Image (cartoon, grey):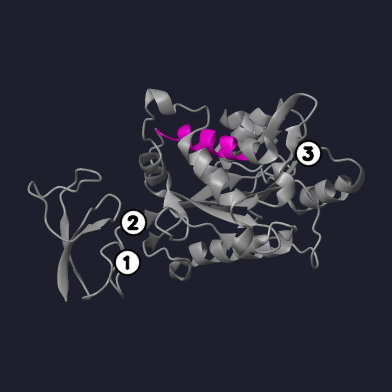
Amino acid sequence: MAIRYKCPECGKTYDTLSQDMLSECHDRPLEPIEVSQGRSSTDPPRGKVSGELMEGLCVLVCDASYSMEEDAFPEEKPDLSKLRLVVDAVQSAVDAMANLSMAKNAYIAIIAFGMHAKLITDRQGQPFIKSVANILAEFSEQATQGQRQKQGKFAAFLQDKFANADETIERRATNITEALQLAKELVDGAMKGDLTQFGFHGRVTLIKHQILTRDTDEIEVPNVRVMIYSDGVQNIGELANPFAGMKPVSVLMTSFIGQPEGDMREGADDLRGMANICPKHGHAGYFLVHKEARGELLRKVFRMATKASGFCTQCALEET
């Protein structure tokens, strides 16, 4: 066994104790831990959990098929791709959570899908399941004057991940079923308190919220939400919704990006049909983004989903 030192804020480990005994990442007093010889200093010890605590989880299920490279609103705003629209909305949602009281315990998992669905990996090659606090810390670097860009660093990271995901997900097709099945496995693991199979070794204790339904019944809903967006129709295998029978209420929200016309109408209708029904307002948790003005709605929805505070458009408006 060897002794290493862990930051209690983010779980990062160090081979040696710093001169002031504080972590370089968060300036917190380092804690000694025992690890097996030969293991990477960034890996949690076998048989032990890391210092991370997950109390809320948002699973973003992201269509990364080739069609997402097309213009989102060709008549209103040429050269804004659907992919760029989405990653900028995610960036905005995360930025808006900088002052969230539970930012270090609210986590985001990101799935990319085409023909297949996979959790994307972070800069260290690990499955992307990160707290809002860690995302903000990692992607908050200030660019120099000569490097300034309109796109945020997290958005740029996501766009690069999706655009270069062909090897793992095969971007030529759209498999919504496989993507949602992976999301459901993440949700089930979080509700059982164990996400080790997905590379998360922290403690998982989801907060439960009491929600008063429109029928004045009170239900208990775990602090977990799933948000899927797509611009197309399922074109490989059978379409299925693993969240359909979830009790007391489905946590799946859906969004269609593009014009729900012609061949694309089927895809829009499918996503609308899979969305949860908000227990508070009775509206479907479905969001159509077919014109530039709806881009702001998409940002609000991502923000709401990440905070696990609602289910539908009305919830998003009330949250604002």
Q: CA distance from mark 2 to mark 1?
A: 8 Å
Where does residue 73 sit, x and y in percent of width and height? 76, 30
Camera-side residue of 93 and 75 = 75
Mark 1 or mark 3: which is in front? 3
Q: Is residue 195 left or right of residue 112?
A: left
Where does residue 302 sit, x and y in percent of width and height? 59, 40
Do callouts 2 and 1 mark residues in contact (Cβ within 8 Å)? yes
Quadrant (top left/top right/bottom left/bottom right) for the C terminus: top right
Residue pointed to by mark 2: 52
Of the residues shown, which amino acid type is indicated by label 1?
Answer: Val
Residue that protrudes farthest toward the left in the picture = 19
Of the residues shown, which amino acid type is indicated by label 3?
Answer: Gly
Tell me which numbered mark, 1 or 3, is placed earlier along the sequence.
Answer: 1
Residue pointed to by mark 3: 258
Camera-side residue of 234 and 280 = 234
Main secondary structure found in the magenta portion:
helix
Q: Is residue 241 magenta?
A: no
> Above or below — where is 74 with respect to 5?
above
Query: Is residue 262 visible in the rendered structure shown here?
Result: yes
Q: Is residue 308 left or right of residue 313?
A: left
What mark, if any, has residue 49 been given in the picture?
Answer: 1
Where does residue 303 sit, x and y in percent of width and height? 55, 37
Where does residue 124 sit, x and y in percent of width and height? 39, 57
Do callouts 3 and 2 mark residues in contact (Cβ within 8 Å)? no
Q: CA distance from mark 1 to mark 3?
A: 43 Å
Secondary element under disc 1, as helix, strand or loop, is loop
Query: Is residue 277 visible in the rendered structure shown here?
Result: no
**Residue drawn 60% across and 33% down?**
299
Secondary element under disc 3, as helix, strand or loop, is loop
Q: Is residue 97 magenta?
A: yes
In the figure, residue 46 lies in which quadrant?
bottom left
Q: CA distance from mark 3 to mark 2?
A: 38 Å
